[in-house]
Image (cartoon, rainbow, N blue to C red):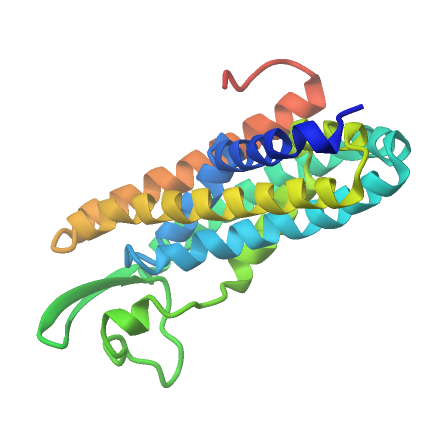
């Protein structure tokens, strides 16, 4: 067993590193890339990624606490159902990719250029909501104000329930002290949230660089949608057949 007195900092460091790395899994990046087509503002992508990370952390935190209490018993059962949950991730990726192409076909993905405090900003929108016009914000502080994204949070929950975080969970039964294990879960979640927030900001950069070229923006959105569709189909096929289809 891992002794808390000598290994606590190592455990927390491992949790943080796994969290930072975990957000870069291909299925995670592909899913969040589809959100970048809806929220083209680079800095607002921060809250898209953070909401995904929070959703991803929530079920893992609950499951991890139970594993800390009952040890290997629940972990074995979770590993049995993990492929089914992973198949659900494939379905979700197909849905997200199809939604991108649906928005493109309807012509609802478009850009607006307007002024905030004397500075030009461009925002990419999938839809308009009644009573909300682009450009009514209050500048950079309004853009950076925390905004919870329910859709991104829900997608994060689906990913959190799937089996891609099993590496993180395997260590839990070896942690003797409950509070050390809880800290491990928390720092893993913090690492995941921070990493995905940065990734989503980076995914919004291509839209910011093509603000005056709608065709380029549509092409980028199409690539994100196609990647989500193909990855989702490949993931489902891999789970259904047991063949190694995805090379990474």
Q: Is residue 83 left or right of residue 193?
A: right
- On the image, the x and y values in percent for residue 163 come to 69, 33
Considering only vertical position in the picture, is 203 above or below 143?
above
Q: Residue furthest bottom?
A: 131
Q: Quadrant of residue 134?
A: bottom left
Front-lying residue, 115 or 229: 115
Report whether 165 appears left or right of 110: right
User: Farthest left residue?
Assistant: 118
In percent of width and height, residue 245 lies at 56, 17
* Vertical position of residue 212 compared to residue 184: above or below: below
Snapshot quadrant of residue 5: top right
Q: Residue at x 67, y 28 (%)?
A: 7
**Residue at 38% across, 42% down:** 199
Q: Does residue 99 appear to the left or right of 143 in the view shown?
A: right
Number of on-image labels: 0
- Identified at 19% across, 63% down, the residue is 122
Going 65% across and 33% down the picture, which residue do you hit?
A: 165
Question: Which of 66/96 is in front?
Answer: 66
Q: Quadrant of residue 109?
A: bottom left
Q: Is residue 38 above or below residue 144?
A: above
Residue 144 placed where, x, y %?
33, 66
Residue lying at the far front in this picture: please name it: 5
Q: Position of residue 148 (x, y in %)?
A: 50, 66
Depth order, front residue of 150/177: 177
The quadrant the N terminus occupies is top right
Note whether 134 is above or below 93 in the view shown. below
């Amino acid at each position: 067993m891992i002794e808390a007195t000598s290994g606590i900092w190592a455990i927390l460091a491992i949790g943080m590193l796994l969290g930072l790395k975990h957000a870069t899994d291909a299925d995670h990046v592909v899913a969040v890339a589809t959100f970048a087509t809806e929220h083209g503002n680079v800095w607002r992508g921060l809250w898209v990624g953070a909401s995904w990370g929070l959703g991803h952390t929530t079920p893992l935190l609950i499951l991890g606490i139970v594993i800390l209490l009952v040890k290997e018993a629940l972990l074995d059962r979770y590993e049995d159902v993990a492929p089914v949950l992973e198949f659900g991730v494939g379905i979700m990726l197909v849905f997200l990719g199809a939604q991108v192409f649906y928005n493109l076909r309807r012509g609802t993905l478009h850009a607006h250029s307007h002024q905030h405090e004397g500075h030009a900003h461009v925002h990419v929108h999938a839809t308009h909501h009644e009573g909300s016009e682009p450009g009514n914000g209050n500048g950079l502080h309004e853009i950076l104000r925390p905004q919870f994204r329910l859709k991104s949070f829900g997608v994060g929950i689906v990913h959190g329930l799937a089996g891609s975080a099993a590496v993180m969970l395997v260590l839990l039964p070896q942690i003797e002290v409950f509070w050390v294990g809880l800290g491990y879960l928390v720092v893993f979640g913090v690492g995941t949230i921070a990493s995905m927030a940065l990734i989503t900001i980076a995914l919004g950069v291509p839209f910011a660089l093509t603000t005056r070229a709608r065709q380029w923006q549509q092409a980028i959105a199409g690539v994100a949608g196609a990647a989500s569709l193909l990855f989702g189909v490949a993931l489902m096929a891999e789970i259904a057949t047991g063949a190694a289809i995805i090379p990474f």
